[in-house]
Image (cartoon, rainbow, N blue to C red):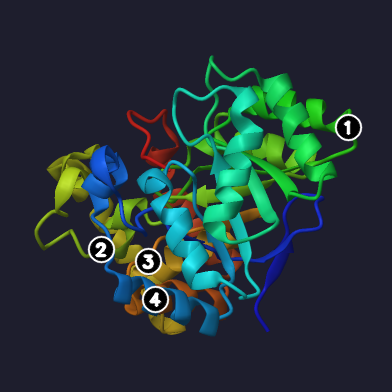
Amino acid sequence: MTETTRLGSSDVVVPRLGLGVMTWGQARGIHRLMPAKMAYGGADEAGEQAAFDASLAAQVTFFDTAAMYSGGGSERRLGELAESKEIVVATKFPPSPLARAEDLPVALDASRKRLRRDVVDLYQHHFPARRVDMPTLMALMADAVEAGKIRAVGVSNYTAAQMRTAHDALARRGIPLASNQVQYSLLYRWPEVDGVLDACRELNITLIAYQPLASGALTGKYLDGPRPRGLRRWQPTFRKSELAAQRPVVALLREIGGPHGKTPGQVALRWLMEQQGVVPIPGAKNAEQAIHNAGALSFSLTPGEISTLEQATRRWRAAPRIRQMS
């Protein structure tokens, strides 16, 4: 039986591991220059189908996308694959950095159409912006809940203070803030320091962790091979000095994973899953990657193993120099 958890105090229940589909779908026109596509490339349709099927077979039924990914292409592709399937779908507003709060109703209806779903399980604000008035946005989110168009409200890339503002605005309508999606991994532990993780636990908000494998660095496959292709190769994560610092961490992940029959990446995902109220959403472009991710569901880490990993990665609790794209 797959482990499940409730998103905050909403009625949306998800497995303890999800799948991010940021790179799925056909990007058209200028959207082909989307940073995520240029950093990670895209999957072909056969790979996406295989990753989707492998995830469902492993009972990973929580899929995260956004209107902005590939100009709606990611939502469209997920909608094609998931039509009539019993899965939990999360997507994000806005479709453009130029959008304002008042654009939410039209944008939500467009997302529902692309996803081929009457109801979006989790609708998230992708990132805070001066153009988007938060009280107005949360009021429109609440309207959408009451209209039966979304089941739960989430945010993404919000600070602790911004979370509290959103939480309080929704609470006035009797609606919980279900989640905050932020970058979090063994090589990016800033949520433990900046107050986000503490606020999530205080307010019963689930932390959805994107980039849980640190752009693939925690798998160890880039330590002795070529750096990744695309824009990702220029991230600080893959500089020689950073790779040298990561080597003992990957060695420790391999050592811990050995008795469990697990890879470094699976141990890194499991470390996040052992954290209270955290759900990681790694990506997958083919069945092999989806099956690898799902391997994190079938074992547990001991308190001693968790503590050892936390001590070994304390340097990554420092203020980040760069955020990865969600």
Secondary structure of the residue carrying tag 2 is loop
Any part of residue 111 in sight: yes
Residue where numbered disc 4 is placed: 49
Q: Is residue 18 left or right of residue 243?
A: right
Q: Secondary structure at mark 4?
A: helix
Image point 21% across, 65% down: which residue? 221
The residue lying at 40 percent from left, 46 percent from top is: 69
Q: Position of residue 213 (x, y in %)?
A: 38, 57
Q: Nearer the viewer, residue 150 or 300?
A: 150
Q: Using the numbered discs, state the Cα–Cα distance from disc 3 to disc 2 in whole angstroms.
A: 16 Å
Q: Which amino acid is tagged 4?
A: Gln
Say which residue label 3 marks: 284
The image shows residue 227 at horizontal and vertical percentages of: 13, 54
Relative image position of residue 127 (x, y in whole percent):
52, 31
Q: Do the CB atoms of the residues marked 4 and 1 lie less than 8 Å apart?
A: no
- Disc 3, disc 1: CB below 8 Å? no
The residue under the point 81% across, 57% down is 11
Q: Which mark is in front, 2 or 1?
A: 1
Residue 284 placement: quadrant: bottom left
